[in-house]
Amino acid sequence: MYSAGLLAVGGDHRKLFVIIPEHVKNSWDEWALKGLILISIASQIVLFLLGNLRKYNPRTRIRIALWCAYLLESAVASAALGIITKSALDVCSNSHPNSQHKKLNTSELMSFWAPFLLLHLGGPDTITAYSLEDNELWLRHLAELIFQSVVAVYILLLSWPGCSHLPLLSISIYLAGFIKCFERVQALRLANTEYLRESMLGSPDPGPNYPKFMEDFQLRKSQGFIVGVKEVPETSHPVIDHANTAGRDTKISEAYDLFQTFKRIFVDLILTFEDRDNSQAYFRHLGYDEAFSTIEIELGFAYDMLYTKAYVVYTFIGTFLRLTSVLLVIMALVGFCFLCDTDHYRVIDIVITYILISTAVMMEIFAVVTLLRSDWTDHWLSQHNYTRNMKPTKRRWSGSIAQLDLISVGLEEKPASLLHIQKFFGIDKYRVKHRYRTYSNVSDNLKSLIYKQFLKFMKVNSDPIALCSHKGSFSLRENKCDNLLWSISKVEFDQSILIWHIATTLCYYSDLESDKDHTDINVCRVESKHLSEYLLNLLVAYPAMLPIGIGMIRCRDTCAEAMRFFKDKGPINGKVEACQKLLQVECTEVLPHEVKGDRSKSALFDGCRLASSLKKMKREDMWKITSQVWIEMLAYAATHCRGFHHAQQLRKGGEFLTHVWLLMAQLGITEQFQVDQGHARARLNVS
């Protein structure tokens, strides 16, 4: 009656004590594989839907669901293939033909499921890598897929030739599965950082033959000639004039061409001044909306390159393989419907089989539809002088920036639920940044402010790269605010963010009467607050994207001091009152660090000190200067973040910092332009 037990030894006899009842074992044997198949199907659907959704949705729950499905994909397929292999071996080793017929039919159908698991391992087009690290581990993925493929082929051999058409039909699914697995491994390999860098380097350039030149030089000199060296710069390539193309149907093609050039900065390679001149010529004719739209398209191509099968599928061979896999899956569906006698199988097994086949067919069809609607297809059509009806604007990124307000944290406006449980698991401090995080849409006003300031800086500076080294000091000096330079030049960058964040918040909530004001000054006021809270969120949530510092320590100490201050001042009703209390503290006669020393890294009252200085200005000047400083800080952060970290954020809905970084590069405001145009060649001047 029972199948398993504990072994006890007593004298010369052994007794079996029960652990697992027989009916539990039978239920497990019957339903384990079916459950795994259904889980595998569900994970494929989740990967297909959320793989593309995460491109423009930054919500954490999206990434958690996708992460779970990504991990289940391989684990479930491995377990299911193991069960199918065991079942096929049991049938082969059964020596009782009369009892074998029913098991044989069931085993054949289960073996027919095996190639679908191989198809699932190939994954959908919308996701090949969950993170960039998966691309670096492409050899590990290759080894896993080879092992799973060998197991699947072994199952086919065990079920061959069989007493039905199922083994023959499964061959078409095997071929489709091999195609999908090849696409995935190839996509991972092509998105590997080392491969990307090598593919973008071009051919080695030894330059002019210096020894031969010097031999000629010495020969002519020994012959008594007066020999000189004259530099002859190479003829520069003409800069393409984009005035007649910008903003038309060629927009995606122009963005694609720019991406092919500037994708090098994602792997920390350098660009030429010729690249800069071409991109500047294009952006010279664009407004802020078109400029940022072009950047969105380019980053969409970057996301597809790093996280999807785009580099494999959007080729002639890739398209051929995709159409082949669709036809193979459809052939299996038609063959199962018309060639197989389903009366020999249980209803539940037939239902699962139809779910497997129909899901595979639908996903292949949707993959083809997605392929046809993509920017890659639009680029191909544009290159071949084809056009199609304009479609609604696609979502290529989240279009939002995360916000974190330090005053809200200090007031503890959102107390933690189940705090004792969070502390038990050690996630209470981790949850703080999620609890207080909000999102704000990136407005046209913010894009306009940033773009205009970049263009203005380029006009007044012969070297626009200088903006990469400013953290707000240029705007302060330009507006004759040298008395505020202490908040920028004499402190670390993370400390500047905290000081200016606190000052901006205090000035914002003490200027609420201007909420109904729709002038440019109020635009500067609102967008200064958005940038302030955005950079603070980056400091807390993604410190790797900012220059190295002790920002987390400073932020924690500042929050702790704010909490203590608000508790000492008694019950405080809202942020407006909290800001009023802070502004009442005298911070100018005795500086905070003179009292506090270096023990605490809090920047709370340094921010109050800055706010007091800002409020002495005219309102128009205060918000104009504040917005300009924040844009400079944003630019400084963008250019000092490595391309690797920018690429990582593409899988989380995209960071606005990345958009600013790529825009600055294409305007020529980056330190990665380090190659002179052409090679200054020399020739002998003999007289």
Image: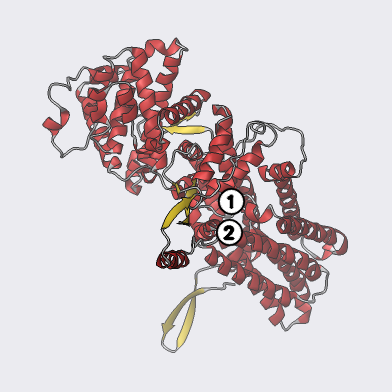
Question: How far from the left and from the top, in percent, is residue 477?
Answer: 30, 25
- Left or right: where 684 falls relative to 328: left
Q: Quadrant of residue 555?
A: top left
| Vertical order, 169 against 679 (above or below) | below
Local crowd at mark 1 within 10 Å, few (<14), some, or many (≥20)? some
Q: Amino acid at mark 1?
A: Met
Q: CA distance from mark 2 to mark 1?
A: 8 Å
Q: Which residue is mark 1?
A: 305
Q: Residue furthest bottom?
A: 12
User: Looking at the image, which residue is at 79% across and 68% down?
Assistant: 166
| Vertical order, 642 against 563 (above or below) | below
Which quadrant of the rendered structure holds the N terminus?
bottom right
Q: Amino acid at mark 2?
A: Leu
Mark 1 secondary-structure assignment: helix
**Which one is nearer the viewer's eye here, 484 or 258?**
258
User: Looking at the image, which residue is at 36% across and 45% down?
Assistant: 427
- Left or right: where 97 falls relative to 25: right
- Left or right: where 260 falls relative to 615: right
Q: Which residue is mark 2?
A: 190
- Do the residues bearing badges 2 and 1 touch, measured as CB atoms within 8 Å? yes
| Observer able to see residue 480 | yes
